[in-house]
Image: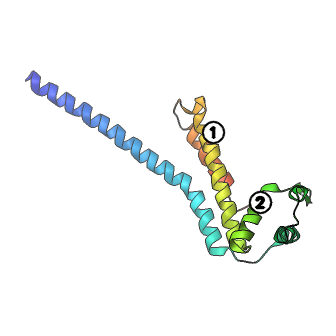
Amino acid sequence: MAKIIKKIKNKTKDTCIQDKISRSRVKWFFAIILILLPIAYCFIFIYQYGINIPYNDEFLFFPFLEKVKNHNVTFLDFFEDINSHRIVIPKIIAIINMVLFDYNSKINMLLFFAFLCFTYALICAYLCNLKCFSRGGGGGFAIILFCAFMIFTKKQY
C-alpha cells in the first residue's frame, strides 16, 4: 500500500512540473506574440499604405542626392543643417536607397523600418543583460513591451 501511495505522489509531482513547464511555454508564446504585434502592425501599415511619392522633408534630400550622383559630395555635406537637425544616418540610408533602388520612397520607409528593428534589438539585448532583469518577474517584460509600442508607433515625428 505504501508503494502505491509513493507512486501516486511521484506521478503528481511529475505532472505538476510538466504543468509548470507548459504554463511557462504558454506565457513565453503570448509574450512573444505581444512583442511582435506592434512590429507587424508597423510593417503592414508601411506595406499597405506606403507610396512612392516624396513627402514634406524628403524633398530636402534631393540636392544632397544630386551631389552624390555627380560625385561632388563632401564630408561636410553629411553634417549639413536641415530644419535645425544634423541627419547623418537618414542621409546614409537615402544614399543606399538611391544606389540600390533609384530612390523609391516606399523602400526608404522599409529601410527605416529595418533600422528601427535593429535599434529595438539593441535595446532588448541591453535590457536583457541588466542584472535587474535576470531576477524574474514581469517588470522586464513590461519595459520591453513598452519599448516596442513606443518605437513602432504610427506617430513618428
114 or 93, nearer to the observer = 93
Tell me if 33 is positioned left or right of 21 in this view: right
Disc 2 + disc 1, Cβ < 8 Å: no
Q: Which residue is mark 1?
A: 126
Q: Is any part of residue 155 visible from this angle? A: yes
Residue 30's x, y, as percent? 47, 50
Residue drawn at x 26%, y 37% as measured from the top left: 15
- The quadrant of the image that shows the N terminus is top left
Tell me if 106 is positioned left or right of 8 in this view: right
Residue 109's x, y, as percent? 70, 67
78 or 110, nearer to the observer = 78
Tell me if 41 is positioned left or right of 21 in this view: right
Q: Which residue is mark 2?
A: 92
Residue drawn at x 88%, y 70% as measured from the top left: 63
- What is the secondary structure assignment of the residue under circle 2? helix
- Residue 147 vertical position relative to residue 126 in the rendered view, above or below: below
- What is the secondary structure assignment of the residue under circle 1? helix
- The quadrant of the image that shows the C terminus is bottom right
User: Quadrant of residue 112 in the image?
Assistant: bottom right
**Residue 150: numbered disc:** none
Could you give the CA–CA distance between mark 2 and mark 1, rounded to whole angstroms?
A: 25 Å
